[in-house]
Amino acid sequence: ENGYLRASRKVRSSSALSDEMGALVTLAGLLRPGDTFVDGGANVGLFCCTMARFRATTPGLRVVAFEPHPDTFQRLEQNGKRCGVEVFPFGLSSASGEVEFEDGAVSHVFAVPQKGVNKSPYTVAGRNRKVQMRRLDEMIQAPCRVVLKLDVEGHELEALKGSARLFEAGCVKAVLLDSDEHPAELYEFLKANGFGFFDARSLAPQHHWNGAVLALHESFVERNEGQHQA
């Protein structure tokens, strides 16, 4: 009982455990042999390095991570090499090329400036960097099966547009969106491509977008429901 009490307190005091653990468990349960896990906005690699550990029980699993911040990428590269993650110093967007980002006082505040969006209080005024962006469907090509995690500070729609050929080929089976801001265009893009929406931690149907949302392709949901019924 003392151990459970200490563990519960540790969860409440750790953002990684309280905010990310449920989504990590959910994503791990989606992986199948031969899948490709893509971590867009990987930071230092919590998600991609965790998923890479499942390669021992998931034959053919490929893990790919993207992080545009130069300093953060160095730490991601060190962590990723230990567990076989393919890491790239790029951001994900609708077009390949160079884009100016606003820097921040902490590593997870690093984003493309957006009109009409309140800046984080941790944004450092006047300290911008130019980074390289890539379309995901130029980096990963069909045929494949993709589980995609995006945490790109409001640039999710552009990242999905840059994955359009993968969606058109039916390669994407799940998308985790870790953001409090989900524009209507983002919802419509995924809905038009056959995705339903669930709470990423509980897998309850998600009717109001808030925080971590898991979009699952209808074919994946139907296939797994059929397996449960059988």
Image: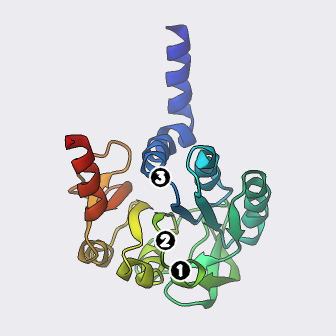
- Horizontal and vertical percent position of residue 128: 68, 80
Give the CA distance from mark 3 to mark 1: 18 Å
Amino acid type of the residue tagged 2 in the rendering: Cys
Q: Disc 1 designates what residue? A: 141
**The residue tagged with tag 3: helix, strand or loop?**
loop
Callout 3 crowding tier (Cα within 10 Å): few <14, some 14–19, many ≥20:
many
Graded by Cα atoms within 10 Å as few (under 14), some (14 to 19) or many (20 or more), the crowding at tag 2 reads some
Within the image, what quadrant is residue 81 found in? bottom right
The answer to whether residue 203 is left or right of residue 1 is: left
- At 65% from the left edge and 55% from the top edge, which residue is drawn? 45
Mark number, residue 144: 2
Disc 3: which residue: 31
- Marks 1/2 in contact by CB < 8 Å: the verdict is yes
What residue is rendered at 50% in x and 31% in y? 12
Q: Residue at x 55, y 49 (%)?
A: 58
Disc 1 marks a residue whose amino acid type is Gln
Measuring 48% from the left and 83% from the top, which residue is drawn there? Answer: 162
SS label for mark 1: loop
Direction from residue 76 to residue 196 in the image, left or right = left
SS for dot 2: loop
Q: In the rendered image of this protein, does residue 138 appear above or below residue 143?
A: below
Give neighbour class at mark 1: few <14, some 14-19, many 20+ (Cα, 10 Å): some
Q: CA distance from mark 1 to mark 2?
A: 7 Å
